[in-house]
Image (cartoon, coloured by chain):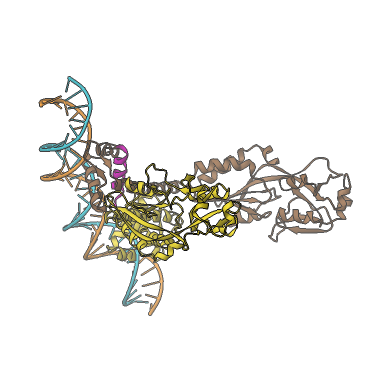
Chain colours: A yellow, B brown, C cyan, D orange
Amino acid sequence: MPSPDSLRAFVLAAELGSFSAAARRMKKAQSAVSTAISNLEIDTGLMLFDRSSRSPTLTPEGRSLLPYANGILLGQQEFSAKASSMSEGVEDRLCIAVEQGIDLTPALNILAEFADHFPHVTLEVLSTGPNDTATLLKEGRAVLGLMTEQESYPTGFQFRGVGHWTLVPVCSAAHPLARFDRVSHTQLRQHRQLVLKSRSTDELGIVGEIKSAATWYAQSPNMILDLVLRGLGWAELPLSVVKDQLKSANLVRMNYRFQQSDVLEGLDLVWTEQHGLGQAGQWIKSQLLNVPQEAWRA
Amino acid sequence: MPSPDSLRAFVLAAELGSFSAAARRMKKAQSAVSTAISNLEIDTGLMLFDRSSRSPTLTPEGRSLLPYANGILLGQQEFSAKASSMSEGVEDRLCIAVEQGIDLTPALNILAEFADHFPHVTLEVLSTGPNDTATLLKEGRAVLGLMTEQESYPTGFQFRGVGHWTLVPVCSAAHPLARFDRVSHTQLRQHRQLVLKSRSTDELGIVGEIKSAATWYAQSPNMILDLVLRGLGWAELPLSVVKDQLKSANLVRMNYRFQQSDVLEGLDLVWTEQHGLGQAGQWIKSQLLNVPQEAWRA
DNA sequence: ATTAAGTATCTGATAATATGATAGGACAGC
DNA sequence: GCTGTCCTATCATATTATCAGATACTTAAT
């Protein structure tokens, strides 16, 4: 059971090659360092320093033991750092729920900076189905959410739009709708629409708009994409999800006859009043709100 | 700078769910644990325990900090263990020189047990050219060696045979000698022999016997093997080195007309008087000497 | 030789920590 | 609801550990 001060004296003396210098660094008397190291030597039963020359040199045993001492000191620093970080109101862990299909690329720099600013905070990024983000927030399992805009949020929810993503109507190259330059409502209605919908039973959690008579639902955009690729229907999917597939020509982008511009879906950053944000949460929230809205268009 | 005792009190109390129990375990008064933890809470600025119920429970902050404390304690145990291990005469590191081509398979179990018996000893296994093993021992860079038997060893060397390995005369399938069922001395002399020889200049360090008029030397058995496979000569090589290649039929095993049995070369375990063995070295030496001699035949 | 810097050790003072006793809270059983 | 048991916090006291300062000795450079 070596005391922290002894270890520090040991490490500093080894580093500086002088007990006196170590004492000055520790703002203690030279005798303190001398006796501390002497005690350490008694405790370990080893000669740690060779004092034959003017400046003490580590013995082989001391050299072998040095990294162990350093490890302990590092551990204590981490302990203290973690403790003071927590005592200053920084959360221990931060959970962010991000709806599947949202491309986090615009936020990656922020996460990297976050790692620097809050090295002791465990970050958890959950990938959720549509509107499950809200559920996680309600249960307190997540403290920040990034999700498609909703008409209304439960009480206690706060939100702010951060941008829009582009919904792209797609079908497989083999699908009948792929033949048309522009498709009408009537044509769309005749084919099965695959809709992104949350697992939860309430009416919330549908991404985009239902335009077809026949609909299938799935929770994940990639699942929808697979179904579309197999020709089972058409869908409106986020650009980031279909970007790669569109290049390979298995997937075809449709053009609506009734709408010229892209279908834009709002992205909201959501948090709750009751589960207050700590410093880390505040930081990441403000950073996310500073991202230019265009960045999310992907 | 939390004291080791505080941390131990913290960890024990968390584990046992009781300050008193922790105090009993530490053989201290209950008040000591109470104040220790109280001080820890003051230092960290955090409530570590919830004392509302009869048995104290960790707060979330305490739970987060617990693994850090445990890490420090583990580090201190390792420090002490390493120190006492060294102070009891166990070496810090143990270097064994093994001549290239010697198959260590019979010793692998011993090494595994060694890791259990001496967890704090760094083991270094050097792979050496012929007789370089002796050089490393002489210089004190290795403390145990496993090498082919020599006629004589330098003064101060001690050795004991542990077994024999089989030297196999081989040539490539394309080599003229490969045509004969049995080869004579005269035939051998007409072809280049590739000999395993140490880098050192003295006359020691030749594995096997020189039988041919023309010889090339190389330091590593694998180098020799490569040369043989390219048809540059014949060689006597350890069975463990050529075993695999013999199966592939690129390499051919020759049979001596003048000698029926396998050519056996002795294996010696070598150590020196001056560089005394520590406990770990003693252990591994005795274990190696207990390996049945047949095990090394590969 | 002399000087400067370093270390070991002793002594008295000081701070940290231990103990033991005491008081009050939580909980199970009657 | 009462009681006994086990628990924790706190206080006063005693013990221990640690510290600073002074001193003597060693090393190395001038």
For the question of whether residue B290 can be seen, the reply is yes
Q: Which span of residues is magenta-colored?
A: B1-16
Q: Is residue B187 above or below residue B52?
A: below
**Can you give x and y, in whole percent of width and height, for residue A56 in the image?**
39, 63
| Farthest-out residue, front | A186
Where, by quadrant of the figure, is residue A117 drawn? bottom left
For the question of whether residue B141 can be seen, the reply is no
**Can you give x and y, in whole percent of width and height, for residue A162 in the image?**
37, 61
Magenta stretch secondary structure, dominant: helix
Identify the residue at horizontal 56%, vertical 60% (top origin).
A181
The answer to which of A124 and A44 lies nearer the viewer is: A124
Q: Is residue A163 above or below residue B152?
A: below
Left or right: residue B130 versus residue A236 is right
The answer to which of B153 and A71 lies nearer the viewer is: A71
Left or right: residue B262 versus residue A152 is right
Where, by quadrant of the figure, is residue C23 drawn? top left
**Can you give x and y, in whole percent of width and height, for residue B78 in the image?**
41, 47
How many numbered marks, from 0 up?
A: 0
Check if residue A78 falls in the magenta segment.
no
**Can you give x and y, in whole percent of width and height, for residue A115 in the image?**
39, 59
